[in-house]
Image (cartoon, helix red, strand yellow):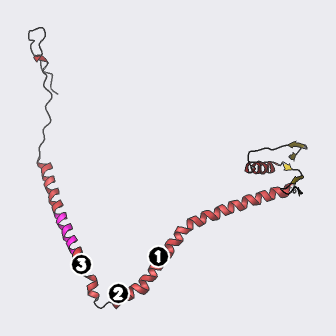
Amino acid sequence: RNVYKDLRQIELACDSQEDVDSWKASFLRAGVYPEKDQTENEDGAQENTFSMDPQLERQVETIRNLVDSYVGIINKSIRDLMPKTIMHLMINNTKDFIHSELLAYLYSSADQNSLMEESADQAQRRDDMLRMYHALKEALNIIGDISTSTVSTPVPPPVDDTWLQTSSGHRRPPPSPPPRP
């Protein structure tokens, strides 16, 4: 039961407690406040629930909304920053590995000239790519020569063969050809 401005009362009935809480919050924002009520808990003992000062309840509701908004902002910023932080840590760890361990390993190898030698597999792959490049370049030249040296003529108009059809056993003279554009 809620008491509002002209000392009128309203009873609120909903399907779930969540709906009741939502309606109560809406009434509080509109200036409708619950009256002092005595309710019984599961043990059968009566428990006093007191309505706070209306202004205090509005402040509590405002603070609750602000805290919910703040928590939402914090969650969003953490979700936004997490991938960036992970990438930052990965890059820094990789950089530290390169500066400390990888360079030491490279300098400690006995034959530094062997590090720059091309492997047999890479040499074979490079040769295959060069052969493919030259073959494709030659094919493009052939296609270019064909398209520039080929002369195409337009297709002639279809032949009018209506004069071949006979009507009632005798032939008609051929019609005059249509004018050419």
Q: Residue at (70%, 60%) from the top-left corner?
A: 68
> How many angstroms separate mark 2 from mark 3 (CA)?
18 Å
Left or right of 14 on screen, residue 72: left
* Residue 156 or residue 45, whichever sits in front: 45
Toward which corner of the image does residue 175 lie, by quadrant? top left
Quarter of the image where one finds residue 104:
bottom left
Q: Which residue is mark 3?
A: 119
Which residues are drawn in magenta?
A: 122-134
* Numbered tag placed on residue 106 in the rendering: 2
Horizontal arrangement in the rendering, residue 95 relative to residue 122 (left or right): right
Contact, CB < 8 Å: mark 1 with mark 3? no
Three-letter amino acid code at the position of disc 1: Ile
Q: CA distance from mark 1 to mark 3?
A: 29 Å
Magenta stretch mostly in which secondary structure?
Answer: helix
- Cβ–Cβ below 8 Å for labels 2 and 1? no
Say which element carries label 2. helix
Query: Where is residue 78 shown, x and y percent of the image?
Result: 59, 67
Is tag 1's residue or tag 3's residue first in the polypeptide sequence?
A: 1
Q: Residues within 10 Å of mark 2 (few under 14, many from 20)?
A: few
* Direction from residue 155 to residue 5 in the image, left or right: right
Towards the viewer: 146 or 170 = 170
Label for residue 91?
1
Q: Which element is circle 1 on?
A: helix
Q: Earlier in the sequence, mark 2 or mark 1?
A: 1
Position of 70 relative to 115 (above/below): above
Where residue 167 appears, x then y in whole percent? 13, 10
